[in-house]
Amino acid sequence: MTALKYPNKKKRKGYWKIYDRARIKDFRKVWNFLLEIIRKLGNPFPKKDNRGRKPKLDRDFYAAICILLAYFDLSLRDMEGEVPLLTDETLDHSTIEWWFEKLDEEYIKKAAKFLHRKIKKMFKKAEYITDSTKITTTRYAKILHKGQETIELICLKLHLIIMYFAAAGILSIESLYVTHGDAHDSPIFREELVPQAQFQRDKRIHGDKAYFAEESILSCEELGIKTNFVPKDNIKHGLILKRAIKEYDNEARKQFRGMIEGLFGGTTIENGNKTRFVKDGCRKTHIALMALSHEIRTYFRALEHKAQSFFVLFFRQPPNYIKALSHLCANHLET
């Protein structure tokens, strides 16, 4: 009998129980939650004037339909068949696409931030990680390469900064940005991701060689964040980069840097890291909605993780359980 090539690893205790109880695939639960969030954030389709025909449904419903389409990776025609089950009305797939085009990417970021703030209140110890992943499309474009015209698949890029809460195994999105597939990571990191983020001071942020640049390191240090980027070889090292090399912790990088791949693996499973939309604006909206969908699933799991923690605490220390529960309820009412 031969030994297993990869011995079984210990899974986090209660992981699958939390996953099942979170009901992240419950169609009705997700729909009701989306309506609740949209009503708190305000409608992304504000009525500017009285021209045109009155919408068949309330504008909140159109926003929820667009998000639900990306959450369950449905096509426009699939979503057309689901609408009567949710609203008792019918919508043509072209109407759904028209509202999808109007959905603002900034509103999606606002919704992701809203959920991220709620998750941050539940957990304490965390590490920041940054990376990007390619999102493919279904279209090809002619590209001039070394004097010859070639045809390549059009790709876009999802850039992220996440918070990894090791105790719960939670990956929550701090900031996101969508670009064309050829965009370099470091300029996007310091010009788009860092200004969006609301960092907790004295935390570390991990990244690969693409982020090892003097400007990127300074942009983090100005906000009180310690950088742990993989050093580049064969480049001129000034004082800031030499200090970054000296402080670089390879063991911490091995421990935390790869955690963000869990998020990208999740989007691959749920959406295939592919967008079927043709218009560039719709593609970027769809990719941003992939990130928002991850944040919604994370929020569901975070709530179940805290519920299980309170349940265990109740049997071990009932007084502490009551105190913690009242504190959580107070925070929930405030938000």
Image (cartoon, rainbow, N blue to C red):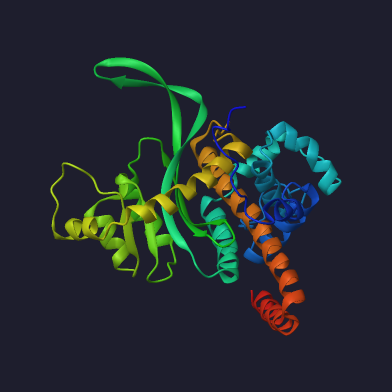
User: Residue at left 75%, top 81%?
Assistant: 318
Q: Residue at x 68, y 63 (%)?
A: 303
**Residue at (45, 32) in percent of width and height:** 155
143 or 209: nearer the viewer? 209
Q: Name the quadrant containing residue 77.
A: top right
Horizontal side of 293 relative to 258 (left or right) equals: right
Which is nearer the eye, 219 or 46? 219
Q: Is 279 located above or below residue 168 in the figure?
A: above
Location of residue 243 in the rendering, given as x and y in whole percent from the top left corner: 20, 61
Task: For residue 45, say whether it is visible.
Answer: no
Residue 157 vs 87, above or below: the answer is: above
| 77 horizontally vs 100: left or right | right
The answer to which of 303 and 27 lies nearer the viewer is: 303
Q: Quadrant of the C terminus?
A: bottom right
Residue 46, by quadrant, is: bottom right
**Numbered-mark total:** 0
Asked whether 323 or 283 is in front, the reply is: 323
Residue 86 % position (x, y): 82, 47
Residue 52: x percent and y percent?
68, 47
Q: Residue furthest right?
A: 88
**Residue 12 percent across, percent down from the top left:** 62, 54
Quadrant containing the N terminus in the rendered view: top right
| Residue at left offset 71%, top offset 81% | 326
> Is there any visible trace of residue 64 in the rendered image?
yes
